Amino acid sequence: MDQHRNKATILSILCMGLGQIYNRQFTKGLLFLAFEAVSVYYFINNLGFALWGITTLGETPRTSANLHEGYDHSIFILIQSLITLIYLIVFLIAYYLNVKDARKVGQLRESGKKANNFMESIRYVLDYKFSVTLLTIPSLGILFFTVMPIIFMIMIAFTNYSAPKHIPPAMLVDWVGFDTFKNLLALKSWSYTFYGVLTWTIIWAVLSTVTTYFGGMLVALLINQKGIKLKGLWRTILILPYAIPQLISLLVMRNMFNGQFGPINQYLRYFGLDAIPWLTEPMWARVTVILVNMWVGIPVSMLLIMGVLTTIPKDMYEAAEVDGATGYQKFKIVTLPMILFTTAPTLITQFAGNINNFNTIFLLTNGDPVNGKYQTAGSTDLLVTWLYKLTLQSNRYNMASAIGIIIFLIIASFSIYNYRRTKSFKEEDMIQ
Amino acid sequence: MSSRKVRNVVRLTSSYAILVILAIAAIYPALWILLGALRPGKSLYSKTLFPETLTLDHFSELFNSRQILFPQWYMNTLKVSICSMILGVLLTLLTSYALSRFRFRGRQNFMSILLVLGMFPGFMSMIAIFLLLKELSLLDTHLALIMVYAAGAPLGLTLIAKGFFDTIPRSLDEAARIDGAGNFKIFTSIILPLSRPILTYLALLQFTGPWVDFIFAKLILRSKPNWTVAVGMWDMVNNAQNTNFTVFAAGAVLIAVPITILFMFMQRLLVDGLTSGASKG
């Protein structure tokens, strides 16, 4: 008995594809070989540069002497290095799979079977590894447009990439460890803004979730009452704010609440009341965003809760009536618990979504009115909108990345809590 | 009349009163912007809600102005949204179908990774994507925008679509498999025809995305002729809020009307999508 297994393994360790060729799978072997050749050529040219780049982030800034060539742009170097390293990981995984495949086919030959030819291999993959085939392309998309950018931004949080002192190409960027986080949390000028914005973000998330949820519940119950006619019509009218694209409705709202010319203040004046600085006074601006968010968000909750109401079994109400429950008691004992149980997970998703509610704030107030005590943030800025401003308006990239990481930690902890709760719901079957 | 009956009448009248107020609040902004688009003059301010005369001038200005390249933006957006819809729905279908129907190693991990990645604020990746596209010299092209939208689709929508596929009984696949159908055949002739609701839902979300997203569009599309409508509208409000309000209103109407009608028709579907995403965790 030949030791096909070991020979094939050793050959494929030496060079991708050799093991397959030894196993007489020529097309597959040649494909592997070509992949290795291309990759090795790429690594010879790039890997050294990548390793140097990711440790030093460049050594020569641009000066008048090397204005067009020969200078290092730290951020380009970082992203190029990152792409090379990600490719290296993909390559190593492919290499590992190649060795495993050669060994498996070798084993097959030892037991006296013939190795698959190329067409048979393809058939095999399509029949038994179909899922992997399906996932390959979307995964590559996610790798390059989501994973890579996130890794990049996490790295940026540990550098000093920030205006005004460290903007390439005229200046270099360096690794600084946890300094960015320390500054954000402890340095007075930053921490004041950070805690201020964080507090408002949480207040906002709680208030906007509670108002839209219970608002939606009230409207749903109102329409669902016995004796209300044209239920479908009311539903359709009240769903309208949800159907209008947010970009448009929020920009329209911004105009409606305009302090000088907007129709809302016009009506107030008409009734002899004072005009209200809806968007220009910090306290009022906060009230306005919550109000407008109710307008945008109540329809969704209403739809959800109306859906739940139709699933509550009639006999539960009948049983309550037999026991002599009043309308209010029926609501408290049957309706409310049923709604809460079924929609609790959505409630937490909505809360997490509101922490990240960029559109409402940015389109409505742009985070303004400006708060003089804050670093580039306004009174209605949430962490996300502040992140956006730090990135695009004041180029404090490292701070923005650090805030992004903190937002992620907040959202992730809520979502994991939610996930585990839903799971326990399913397993316990507490209701129904 | 018994006191019970009186109470009932009071309850119903007050309910109707509240519903009417809510309905006015829901309709008013839409009505206001529609009338704003038809009102003569340029300013935000108007004496009455219903103007004395109506005009279509602002729509024609929208199509003939040299500053506002609205027709071009509209076509750009249409192109981007159709392409990203086709690609994005396809990618989402692939991932969600694989996750729902096949049991393979790392399946749970793949789903958790999707969940975790979805928790990062989307535009935290802004700068990196910007630099990546610069490396590929794809900045200021629609291809780049299509790629970003399509690649992002599986991230948010996979778990929802997977929840839907889970409800299609597996016995159907197995029956087809016994009859000799391969994986592709099963997918195209059994699964796809049964997943019309979720397909429409995904397509609708992917299609409307480019019409309302201005964050990435603004970042990637640098020159005015390449903009999408969302960037154009935002620019109009931000730079010339009060001087050109009525033209903005006309543009807003042209964008909002088709999307609103689509959404109204598919209300039921949207609820299903919302809840299926929610209960599957």
Image (tube, coloured by chain):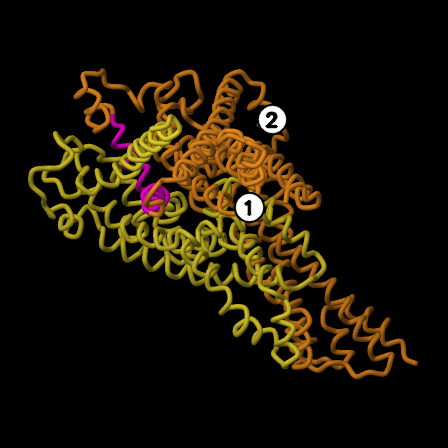
Chain colours: A orange, B yellow
Residues at discs 1 and 2 both on one chain: yes
Would you say residue A405 is visible in this rendering?
Answer: no
Give the residue number, with chain letter if any, for mark 1.
A313
Write down the residue under mark 2. Answer: A179
Mark 2 nearby-residue class (10 Å; few <14, some 14–19, many ≥20): some
Q: Is residue A272 magenta?
A: no
Magenta span: predominant SS is helix
Task: Residue A8: name its quadrant.
Answer: bottom right
Q: x, y (%) of residue A342?
A: 57, 42
Circle 1: element type: loop
Q: Residue furthest left?
A: B53
* Residue drawn 53% across the image and 16% down it: A188
Q: Amino acid at mark 2?
A: Asp
Residue B29 image-quadrant placement: top left
Separation of marks 1 and 2 at Cα, in angstroms: 58 Å
The residue shown at (79%, 75%) is A105
Q: Chain of mark 2?
A: A
Q: Quadrant of the N terminus of chain A?
A: bottom right
